[in-house]
Image (tube, rainbow, N blue to C red):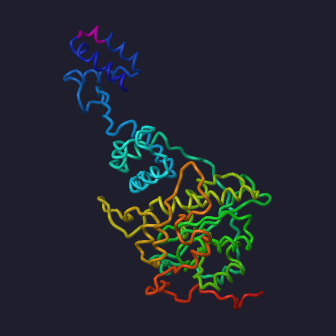
Amino acid sequence: MTSRAEITTRYARSFRAADRRTKGRILDEVVSVTGWSRDNARRRLTSAAPSPPGAGRSVATRPRKQRATKFSYDALKVLQRVWAASGGQCGKYLAASMRTQLDGLERHGELVDGVGRYSMAVRAELLAMSAASIDRYLRPAKATDQIRGVSTTKPSPLLRSSIKIRKAGDEVEAEPGFFEGDTVAHCGPTLRGEFARTLNLTCVHTGWVFTRTMRNNAHVHVLAALQAGVQEIPFTITGLDFDNGTEFLNKAVITWAGERDIYFTRSRPYKKNDQATIESKNNHLVRKYGFYYRYDTSEERHALNRLWKLVNDRFNYLTPTKKPVGWGQDKAGRRKRLYDKPQTPLDRLLAAEALAPAQERELIALPRPTQPRRDRPRDRRHPGCATHTRQGQDRAALPRHRPDRPTRRPQGHPDQGRLTPTFAGIPP
């Protein structure tokens, strides 16, 4: 169209002043070049002749001059490094956590002033970038993965009726501790044989995540992963919500939850939106870092569990999230969801004031993760911390909640899902 507009502008004045025979030759030339009909070419030449090319004329549109870039090339290259180290966060989240990301990379020696295009001027440019600018500058560096996984959820009709369905009024979202859980199968393209599974727990209120890879979905391994989550999560688990899979709805897991007075619910069958929080983590946590490959050896499971410690630290300390806070209207009067400002799970946990002062000091004293391209020591505690040697036991020994603030329970049904290990009415 640009070439056609240039040809029309070139012949418009001469076409208007030419005689009948010359106009015929001009029309023949324009038609042969543009492919228009003679009537269309005549109409465009006539309309372009009275005035010179200008804005609003499709026949004489000049190419738009490219706007000068606001940020330097060095800032663009450093932004790509920060984006890769953050795990590929979107513009809104990366803009909210940019200062934290830069401080962590500087602390671990990944960004040094005067080395690799990084400087204090570049840091100031990165902190001044808006979310839209970050997305625009990162557009060439982003890529998508078209591989998809295989669902392995098998319903458990025997015990499903004994577990209450999670309802909107029963969600314990005003206090940390209510977790959604699910497993992801690392089976590759086939379900044959034994393959590893990854259990993920996500707190609905804070977004705190815990991930552990198991040998299979037998209740022995599921219970071991859940017990590890109870020890490593820095606050009390007050409720668990799972799907209808047999790896969760079995007597062993229900007994374990009943003995610990954990509120136990399930989602509706074939309704993945009931567990929107954990379903999103299955994608951009487990699949993003564990991919869609098949893992079926002890070495691979050990490597994944080493990886999950670093990934969990990244999500819990460095990755901000948004939470819905209500409904509103846009300019056209349509209903839309309203969200709060992005915050990391650690910030939400501290703002909830659900931890004892000793537990808060311990979390703040932990060294901030993470080295993007280096594996860190197995023990994540600072050497000066008093509880340096036995992470799980010492963390579990600390008070999890403030003594003057009782744990929040569901308001609608106080005994709903509160299971006991007696299994009344359930055949052995």
- Name the quadrant containing residue 227: bottom right
Q: What is the x, y in percent for residue 278?
A: 56, 66
Quadrant of the image containing the N terminus: top left
Residue 103: % across, % down? 42, 53
- Residue 114 among those drawn in magenta: no
Q: Residue at x 35, y 44 (%)?
A: 120
**206 lies left or right of 55:** right
Residue range in magenta is 18-23
Residue 276, can we see it? no
> In the image, residue 34 lies at what x, y percent?
39, 20
Query: Is residue 149 toward the left or the right of residue 170 in the image?
Result: right
Whether residue 107 is situated above or below residue 409 in the rendered picture: above
The quarter in which the C terminus is drawn is bottom right
* Residue 334 relative to residue 322: left or right: left
* Residue plotted at (67% across, 79% down): 160
Question: Which residue, as the protein is rendered here, is positioned at the far left?
Answer: 50
324 relative to 51 in the view: left or right: right
Q: Residue at x 35, y 47 (%)?
A: 129
Residue at far right of view: 193
* Main secondary structure of the magenta stretch: helix
274 is higher (above) or lower (below) than 291: below
